[in-house]
Image (spheres, helix red, strand yellow):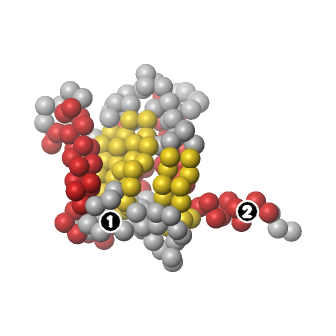
């Protein structure tokens, strides 16, 4: 017996051509593309994501699949949101759908953070803001925004001292100078 919805679910896990999805925000997916993403607390007063017992959960989740499901380039954890730049590599002619990757990160972190806070319920807004990085200048603009965000919000006087920023190398030792935008 076959599940008629299984093929649809499997197809939505991967992208083989440019796709445009819409909920409240437009979401464009392009195989092998690099993205600037932002995900935000459902209620901005719910908790401080930069607290020493919460930020490492988020950073650990972002780093966990680095080199497998995506290549992580930059990230910053802010009090009520997270920014990151990641690239979804093509494997076997297809790329895992961005919404699936984000669902995985958000659901895993929500469960752990809710456990830490002794609460239940929704932690993250349903939608994630995403922007396809178009060229090296676009990458530099978004990477600079990530790096300067804690300074711009008055959280630090020196972005180099912000503990919840990462500019780690992508999988395979790729550096910003080796950037291929897909």
> How far apart in space, not on screen, are marks 2 and 1 (Cα)?
32 Å
Between residue 132 and residue 97, name the one nearer to us.
132
Q: Residue at x 48, y 74 (%)?
A: 91
Name of the residue lying farthest toward the top: 45
Q: Which mark is residue 129?
A: none
Q: Is residue 33 left or right of residue 152?
A: right
Q: Which residue is mark 1?
A: 181
Q: Residue at x 24, y 60 (%)?
A: 136
Between residue 100 and residue 121, name the one nearer to us.
100
Between residue 86 and residue 117, name the one nearer to us.
86
Q: Is residue 5 left or right of residue 70?
A: right
Task: Examine the rendering and report whether any part of residue 8 can be seen.
Answer: yes
Query: In which quadrant will I find the N terminus?
Result: bottom right
Q: Which mark is residue 6?
A: 2
Name of the residue lying farthest toward the left: 158
- Number of on-image labels: 2
Q: Is residue 26 left or right of residue 7?
A: left
Q: Residue at x 19, y 33 (%)?
A: 151
């Amino acid at each position: 017996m076959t599940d008629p919805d299984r093929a649809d679910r499997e197809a939505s896990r991967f992208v083989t051509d440019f796709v445009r999805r819409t909920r409240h925000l437009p979401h464009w997916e392009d195989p092998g593309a690099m993205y600037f993403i932002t995900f935000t607390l459902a209620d901005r007063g719910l908790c401080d994501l930069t607290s020493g017992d919460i930020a490492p959960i988020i950073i650990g989740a972002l780093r966990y699949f680095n080199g497998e499901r995506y290549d992580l380039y930059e990230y910053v954890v802010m009090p009520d949101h997270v920014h990151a730049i990641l690239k979804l590599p093509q494997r076997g002619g297809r790329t895992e759908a961005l919404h699936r990757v984000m669902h995985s990160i958000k659901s895993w972190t929500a469960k752990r953070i809710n456990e830490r806070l002794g609460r239940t319920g929704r932690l993250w807004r349903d939608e994630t803001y995403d922007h396809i990085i178009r060229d090296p200048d676009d990458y530099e603009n978004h990477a600079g925004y990530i790096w300067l965000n804690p300074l711009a919000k008055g959280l630090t006087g020196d972005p180099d001292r912000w503990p919840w920023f990462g500019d780690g190398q992508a999988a395979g030792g790729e550096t910003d100078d080796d950037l291929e935008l897909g």
